Image (spheres, rainbow, N blue to C red):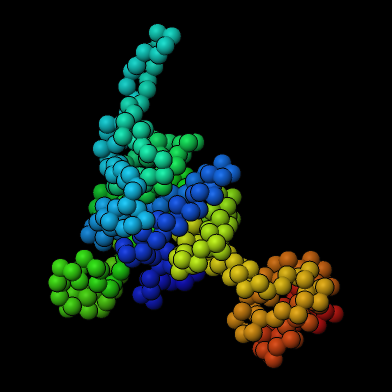
Amino acid sequence: MTDYKKLGMPLPNEIAAEDIPLTLQFVEKINEKCREVGHQQLALFLQGPVACGKTATLRNLNKIAKFADKEIIFLNAKVFAKDYGNPIPMMNNEGEWILSPVIDKQLANRQKNGIVVADECDRIDDVHLQVMLENTVDQADNTSTVVFMGNGKFSQGTCRVPQNFLTRCASFIVWDENPTQWEIQNGVDNLFFDLRKKIGRPDAYYACQRPIATALQKRSCFWAAKAYDVVSENKEFYPVFSGMLHALFEEQTANAVDVRFELKRMNLPSLNELAEGDARTANDPQTMQAHIDMLIDTATCEFDWKIIVDYSRRQPFAELRKALEERAIKAGYATAV
């Protein structure tokens, strides 16, 4: 795993505040495909320090043409948990006393295809966070795009959110060393931007919770597949596609999925297609190596390995070919070399 902190590098699921609207549109498109087949919808989880721009960006969404007519509901998770998460005694139609949660009328009566923003989600306990999920993204008839926000390790008083919450979200960390539009418009001196880059990202940045789908969980796989479909239909979202994968999966899995989607996009041949004489070939060693790794994942016999070794000989990448032959011998397929 890459030691991002040691290298002073951004995490792969980092976005700037200015990227939030496009990412939000991307999630809306993914959720349209979710609703077509009745699948669990995807929420956004944005973590970042106070004044990083996440709240201001969302409050100004209606100024962007594509969001101009959308209803945007803002909730404070702490207030919601206090007022609506605690059940109260009520009498049902049979005259029995039961415990029933109070309903947020604004949330219950929200318009279709709107946006629900819930802030301070990492400042409430798991029980109340579950109530928040049940009243938003987990509702069967939900058509709203749900955005959860928190400060993560950037602020005191926050807590770790549970796994069942993270597996419903694409998790991003909002951070940008470059000046934001707000800072430019309000005349913040350039010396602060130079200092920001020199000081680098704080320790809290690397301590923020990240995606945990180390196994290829069904939900994350479905969302990733639909994200690829959206990008295939609309190239506008291609710049945020890789970030979305890293918001759904942990690093190693995301990298593997990203490579395979890229090969699919580049239309390189499968093992069966190579066996049938497909002449398509990767043109650089990095792409060919990635392609070969994918082919090996599907290889089941000596014949498959021979096809892969023969494929590696189409280009003059001697080091790559030698490494592949060593892998074949180590796997017990020396006669394929």
Q: Is residue 36 above or below residue 238?
A: above
Q: Is residue 144 above or below residue 293?
A: above
The answer to which quarter of the image holds residue 215 is: bottom right
Q: Is residue 208 above or below residue 238?
A: above
Number of marks: 0
Q: Position of residue 68 (x, y in %)?
A: 32, 52
**Residue nearest the observer in this picture, 308 or 223:** 223
Residue 127 visible in the picture: no
Q: Where is residue 36 in the image (x, y as percent from the top left)?
A: 56, 45
In which quadrant of the rendered image does the C terminus lie? Answer: bottom right
Q: Where is residue 187 in the image (x, y as percent from the top left)?
A: 14, 72
The answer to which quarter of the image holds residue 311 is: bottom right
**Residue nearest the observer in this picture, 264 or 100:** 264
**Residue nearest the observer in this picture, 209 or 238:** 238
Q: Residue at x 31, y 43 (%)?
A: 73
**Residue nearest the observer in this picture, 158 or 114:** 114
Is 29 on the left or on the right of 54, as rendered?
right
Q: Residue at x 26, y 61 (%)?
A: 52
Q: Is residue 8 above or below residue 95?
A: below
Q: Residue at x 43, y 49 (%)?
A: 43
